[in-house]
Amino acid sequence: MIATPDRTPLPREFFDRPVLEVAPDLLGRVLVRTTPDGPISLRLTEVEAYDGQNDPGSHAYRGRTPRNDVMFGPPGHVYVYFTYGMWFCMNLVCGPEGRSSAVLLRAGEIVEGAELARTRRLSARNDKELAKGPARLATALDVDRALNGTDACAAGETPLRILSGTAVPRDQVRNGPRTGVAGEGGVHPWRYWIAEDPTVSPYRAHVPRRRRS
């Protein structure tokens, strides 16, 4: 019999740990996005860890800026960034305040509110593709920079909340290099995903951009 997912919100203490502990432990947890049109819930199936100023692949590697300021704040907050001039991506800050580590939410399975997610992801060929990749995930959940800094552990109403869900057994967790990360940061096997899950995005190595002649 399949266990019923735990609807208890994750406490701040869950996120106040080293990023390499938090990242794989987020798999199977449920992200709830409350919108004016109704809730959308997503079971996390793929994430990546970024270890702040210790990690050349991190936005915080070169220090604090207005863009990455949320990463240096308390754990359990949401860091949203804009990339390639068109997409948003969502992270959860973890570790002690000032550490600037975060977990990128790369993919998940929509378990509630699929009808709402479909209206935002019209190009998805099926429901498994609704949140298959970090930009698709943010689009399906209607996440943009307006949600940057949201406290996912706040008491009362909040537009984003992480529920306990059902933790994934460690023998079902896989890890490998992070997608699209170049240089020294590209060697870290800090991408984690649920084995054989159809909502996990395909791995792509970094491809240098060609400058126009």
Image (cartoon, helix red, strand yellow):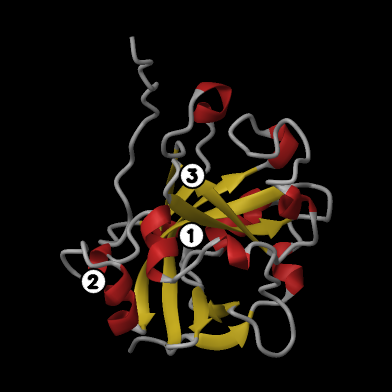
The disc labelled 2 sits on which kind of residue? Asp
Vertically, is 194 above or below 30?
above
Mark 3 or 1 closer to N-term? 3
Q: Which residue is mark 3?
A: 83
Residue drawn where x is 68% and y is 46% of the image: 67
State whether residue 85 is above or below residue 159: above
How much space separates mark 2 and mark 1, taking CA atoms?
A: 26 Å
Residue 116: quadrant of the picture: bottom left
Q: Which of 200/40 is in front?
A: 40
Measured as percent of width and height from the top left, residue 130 is found at 29, 66
Element on which disc 2 rests: helix
Residue type at mark 1 is Arg
Which residue is located at x 36 percent, y 59 percent? Answer: 136
The residue that mark 1 highlights is 170
Q: Which residue is mark 2?
A: 127
35 or 174: nearer the viewer: 35
Q: Position of residue 109 (x, y in %)?
A: 35, 70
- For marks 3 and 1, give the CA distance: 32 Å
Which residue is at the front of the view, 206 or 45? 206
